[in-house]
Image (cartoon, grey):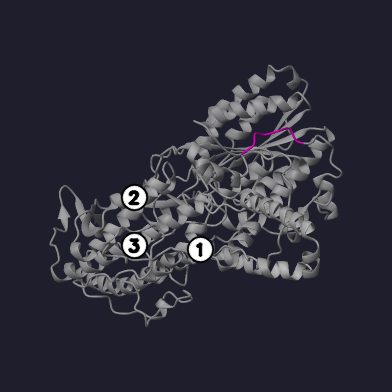
Amino acid sequence: MTPDDTSPASKQDGSRWKGEPAEAPPVSAAPPTAKKKPPIAAKQGDPHLPPPASTTEPPNQSSGTVTADPEHARESFFDRHAIENTASFLASLIFHLAALLALALFVIEETKPPTEVALIVRTDVEDLFEPELETVVLDQQDHAASMTTLLQQGGDPTTDRQLTQTPAVNMSDLSQVFEQDSYDAPTVEIGSVLDEYVPRSEILVEVPHDAPGVARAVVEGYSDALDRITEEIRDILYQRPVLVIWCFDRSESMKDDQEEIRQRIDRVYTELGLFSHASGGALKTAITSYGSQFWIDTPEPTHDRAKISAAIAALTPDPSGKEIMCEAVARAIATFDEYASRGNRQMVLILVTDESGEHADNVSNLERTIAIAHQAKCRTYVLGREAVFGYPYVRFRYQHPQTNRIHWLIADRGPETAFVEQLQTNGFHRRHDAFASGFGPYEQSRLARETGGIFFLLPSKEASIVRGDKRVYELEQMKYYRPDLRSREEIFFDRDQSELQLLLWKIISDLNPYNPQSKDVTELRVHFSPDPAQFVRQMNLQIGRANTYQRYLAAATHVIEQANELRQRELDPRWQANYDLMYAQLIAYQARLFEYNAYLKIFMKNPVVVPLIRPPNLRLVHWDIRTRTETLTGEVIEPYVKRANELFQQVIDTHPGTPWAERARWEMKRGYGIELRPVYHPPYRSVPASQLKPLPKL
């Protein structure tokens, strides 16, 4: 499975991994052994990997001490004639020189650098990260100009602030990286409205965060989050009037959440109404919402609780399935900025959503939205969901009410980082899991943190979510694995300076099923037709594709094994964990792929016969690939299985209480064997196309 030395994939610089398709090794052939030392030390005698190479460093030739010849020193310094005629002077001089020499040697011994290497321990790692700070009151100084004025004049709301210039990044290059990010981003017509608030040329300017907020506050539900927001608003009301802007996501999946908030919001305003500083119109509220466009649901801010409740109840789902989150937040702030300025009100925006928003909108408008919030001195609080671990999507099971057919609806809910840091494949095709990351989506976490607000991490309660993981990770341990919440431009620039990060990114990209250049290889079929003729055609195609995919995985493994030194020099626990998990997965996926190919060949020669119909009314709809513990090529893939399990266990031991450890544990439980299982469904109802209800878009 490792490319031979004559193949393009075996180039030392890893410049070409994919190579030309080659015939797969016969089922009975043993997997070739790895050629480089793995990043995590292998056990002696491991049949899969060679013994670890010596790590003894050569002596440092430049660090030795050069000592002058004492005889030569005396000869060049003293006058022989003076010594012969001045014996007493000579004796005194020799005595003092000896004393000075002894003193000098004593000082050198004390200041000599230690020969032992200092180790970086776990407690030191915390210094690499800035702490998550509680919200503080923002500067109460009035605006120099309102957003409305800036909109009319085409001004730049960042010109009156002290700005920190980030490294220059070519935006055309950056846009190509975003387009090839983790998935095919849906096209969103954003227009140029935000360019009038913050010109696109200002995206590369980092807005200072004088009052950083909280990027993650774990809560049990809306009640806990609203209680905290009530306290925040009460603290502000001590100092000045407040304008609260609610910004609701109108997607289909949010209807129940909107109703829950509507029922609980009365308690919030009741508690605030009992507070003397909230009387006399000091607290006003506006309701806004968004989907594929932005809506203002209360034309004028109000303190009437009945109007607030009615506006929330009147929200209807947007059938488009799009969420222009960043643009909506920016528009909401800009719309009411002048009103807040006239009344010297502190603006507070509360974003309610269960998705991360449109990818194109996030990339184009996140930094400008933060700049607008800073100019308006608007805090942003987010009631959101946990991001998927290193992956954009979650899938929901949906049974069509008319046809009874099962569909899998897709929603964006991640990742927790600006760029994906995990493999987007499960070894056969694009991931279908919803593994929890322990953090919120990158855009929402950054927005809350940079504007002095809070991201409230609500529990994911959907029972229909596919392969969801509701595990709560160890919060103390997770602080060392916090995602980087700087701007995408800064992260992109720094990633180019890191050999390890660039290498992992290349592996992720080349094995990404969403990448148009590799999806035909990395997306293997796991559902096969019950029709015998079509079944055979599908299997033959998959066997050929799996042969090429085998070389992809082998080449990626070869490259990542060569990066052992980079892994050892890495100080960030998050990138250490990324490397460790990815290396183990690449070896495990090779074992499963070898088994996949072998199983399909054997199944074609000796197919399993099953009935087409089962009582009471079930019919065979397709065959499914499933993983299992039992393998057909046990002795052949045993070195791979053994090594993969060792590496997964080391991930669990090295990064306990984290998503990396849980993901490693899940990979081990999957098993390395493959089998085909028949799938039966009851007959679907036939509905005329004109009467068929469309699938909901989340």
Is 137 magenta? The answer is: yes
Residue at the (57%, 50%) spot, across then down? 357
Mark 1 → mark 2, Cα distance in angstroms = 24 Å
**Circle 2: residue type:** Gln
- Of the residues under marks 1 and 2, which one precedes in the sequence? 1
Q: Residues within 10 Å of mark 3 (few under 14, many from 20)?
A: many
Q: Residues within 10 Å of mark 2 (few under 14, many from 20)?
A: some
Identify residue for label 2. 649
Given residues 563 and 215, the one toward you in this image is: 563
- Of the residues under marks 2 and 3, which one precedes in the sequence? 3
Q: Quadrant of the N terminus?
A: bottom left
Q: Position of residue 455 (x, y in %)?
A: 59, 39
Tag of residue 505: 1
**Circle 3: residue type:** Ile
Circles 2 and 3: CB distance less than 8 Å?
A: no
Closer to the camera: disc 1 or disc 2?
A: 2
Q: Does residue 519 lie above or below 264 as drawn?
A: below
Instruction: Answer yes or no: is residue 193 visible.
Output: no
The quarter holding residue 350 reads: top right
Residue at the (43%, 67%) spot, across then down? 562
Instruction: Answer yes or no: is residue 47 visible.
Output: yes
Q: Is residue 229 left or right of residue 633?
A: right
Identify residue for label 3. 587
Tag of residue 552: none
